[in-house]
Image (tube, helix red, strand yellow):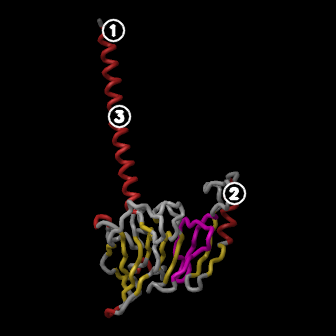
Amino acid sequence: MDQERLLKRVWLVNGLLLAVLFVALAIWLVVELGSSWFHRHSAVITATPGAPADRTSRAVRYDPPQSIWKSTTRIVLITYGEAFERPAPKLASSEYSGERYTLYVNAIFLEPGGGPGHLLLDRPALIRSVNFPRSKDDSLQAWITYEIAFEDTDGDGGLDENDAASLYVSDLHGGSFRRVLPEGWSILTHEPLDGRRMVVLALRSAERGDRRSLNEAPERAFFYDVQTGRAEPYAALDSLTARAARIVGH
């Protein structure tokens, strides 16, 4: 009798565990499907044919003009999609460089006194982050940086967070827009050094046939002169990091 009661309890516990497992699996599936739906419907549609038919056009949204430290120009960030996708007020500041699902597609630079202003970009793009100085705390940064994907590198017919992005820079008026490092470099991070230069850390992208993972790719440091658009190796830092790598046996 006791054995029969014990078996019933075992089966009851097993049944409860299976029920919990199925509920957890159902929740995981809902989250994954929801994430996939959001990813599919939030991608920026490219101007080229081949974008999936279920990606319908959506109206752009934009934030109020924001002040740029030591500039008379004001910046307006343009997003793409529903109103609930609007980023938080500080998302574009130098205090917070960006967010994975923020869909910036362009920026407007407004001149003082109601001047004509201008757009930053003239082609489809996904701007992952915008970083501009907002106060004296950002006095070392006399430029604006952008992480932008222009190409549909994963071939899914739209621009999204899975497409390769590169680092770009402009002056505080949205002019002199240029790419920081040439093709073949993946930017890790960047920091202002003084009023005209920044330090950029990057990985060399794998070439065709190269089987190394990003974990095996050596990291490199560069000085980038924003005024001249020239990048040069930060040799002292690269030399010391190479020594550190040898110490740990790399």
Contact (CB < 8 A) between labels 3 and 1?
no
Q: How far apart are marks 3 and 1 (CA)?
A: 29 Å
164 displayed left or right of 234: left
Place of residue 43 in the rendered image (x, y in percent of width and height, measured from the top left): 41, 63
State the residue position of label 3: 22
Dot 1 or dot 2: first in sequence order is 1
Outermost residue toward the top in this view = 1
User: Tag 2, which secondary structure?
Assistant: loop
Q: Residue 209 carries which label?
A: 2
Q: What residue type is labelled 2?
A: Gly
Q: What residue type is labelled 1?
A: Gln
First of labels 3, 1 by sequence position = 1
By secondary structure, the bulk of the magenta-drawn segment is best described as: strand
Disc 1 element? helix
- CA–CA distance in space, label 2 to label 3: 43 Å
Give the magenta-colored segment's residue range. 177-204
Cα distance in 3D space between marks 1 and 2: 64 Å
Label 1: few (<14), some (14–19) or many (≥20) C-alpha neighbours in 10 Å? few
Mark sitting on residue 232: none
Task: Look at mark 1 in the image and give the residue it sits on.
Answer: 3
Q: Residue 160, how many percent across, how many down?
A: 45, 63
Residue 162 location, x and y as percent? 49, 60
Is 180 one of the magenta-colored residues?
yes
